[in-house]
Amino acid sequence: MEKGSLTLNNRRFTSCSKGNPYEDLYIYYLENIPECEEEGLLGPHFLGNWVEDGSSFLFFSKPSREYIQRLIDKNKKLKLYDEFYFTYEQWQGGEIEPIRICDFYIIPPWLEAPEIKGKIKMILDPGVVFGNALHPTTRDSLIALCEIFKKRSFSTVIDIGTGTGVLAIGAGLLGAGKVLAIDINLLAVNTALKNVRLNALEGIVEVREDRAESFVGYQNELLIANIHYDITLQLIKIGVFEAKKFFILSGLMRSQAMDIKSELSRYPVEIIREWDNGGIWYTILGRVREK
């Protein structure tokens, strides 16, 4: 395969000739959800379907309105609400390039980076899913992972709302014995599975499509949840945390973090450390005291 080279942050990288496969994103917002077999009608540029609240966001790398119309003609329950265009950088909030976060050196698979002494290389293809390590909540969750793994080892970890799998993979690369990564969204599950394989962690990280509520009473040593505030609050109230020893909570804005800490104060919980990113985004590292 032909290769070219580029320089980022004064370091030299090798790039496959195909480059970033996600240069442009065309998104079609549909009422209702296409059947799995119907997605085969969507042509060669279909990237995936993000399902949320009974609606679908279909992602393509090229304009594909004719395929959407074909899908709607076949299933009258579907309705096109809207369509959008983004560059990949706009969608992801910045250019996907090699990035250093605590012990990790995170790089997309379309770049070949030199090894950096003292850093753990993580290959991450975010696709169109949340979790590219650019967002403060992902960065601070990785920093929290590095901090707690320096103090002790973990044989079992669960990552709720895994997204791209970045935090589950981080735990696996830091030495966790077994990691269960769950997400309710199939596109996220497939993206995480791809990233697990890219990092050769198939025997350590298991990715599963499931609901967080299914894991009440699930025994493990570390829970990671970089998810919506209301889901985190619900998980605390139904007792998901009670069978865990340590936890990392993120995806929280300031007032939400205060509410979460207030709710946690009703349980035998100790806050080990908090990360405050610009007074906006908060990440909490804590542990459950033994009864």
Image: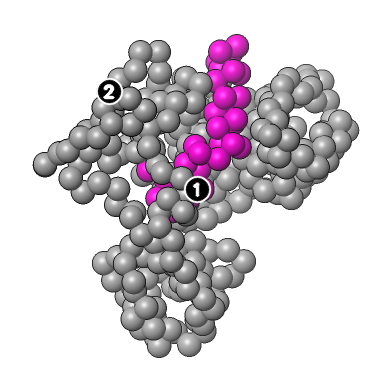
Question: Which residue is depicted at the point 43% across and 66% down?
Answer: 85
- Residue lying at 67% horizontally and 48% vertically, measured from the top left: 228
Q: Residue 25 at what x, y percent from top left?
A: 39, 61
Can you tell which quarter of the image residue 260 is in? top right
The residue at the point 30 percent across, 39 percent down is 109
Q: Which residues are magenta?
A: 125-153
Q: Which residue is mark 1?
A: 93
Task: Please identify the quarter of the rendering in which residue 140 is found.
Answer: top right
Horizontal side of 149 relative to 281 (left or right) equals: left
Residue identifier under label 2: 114
Instruction: Find the distance from the CA under tag 1 to the CA under tag 2.
Output: 25 Å
What's the amino acid at mark 1? Gly
User: Taking 106 as reference, is 281 left or right?
Assistant: right
Please state the horizontal and vertical placement of residue 235, each as a whole percent of the image: 73, 44
Furthest residue in direction left, as rendered: 1
Q: Is 149 contained in the magenta span?
A: yes
**Callout 2 amino acid:** Pro
277 is higher (above) or lower (below) than 271: below
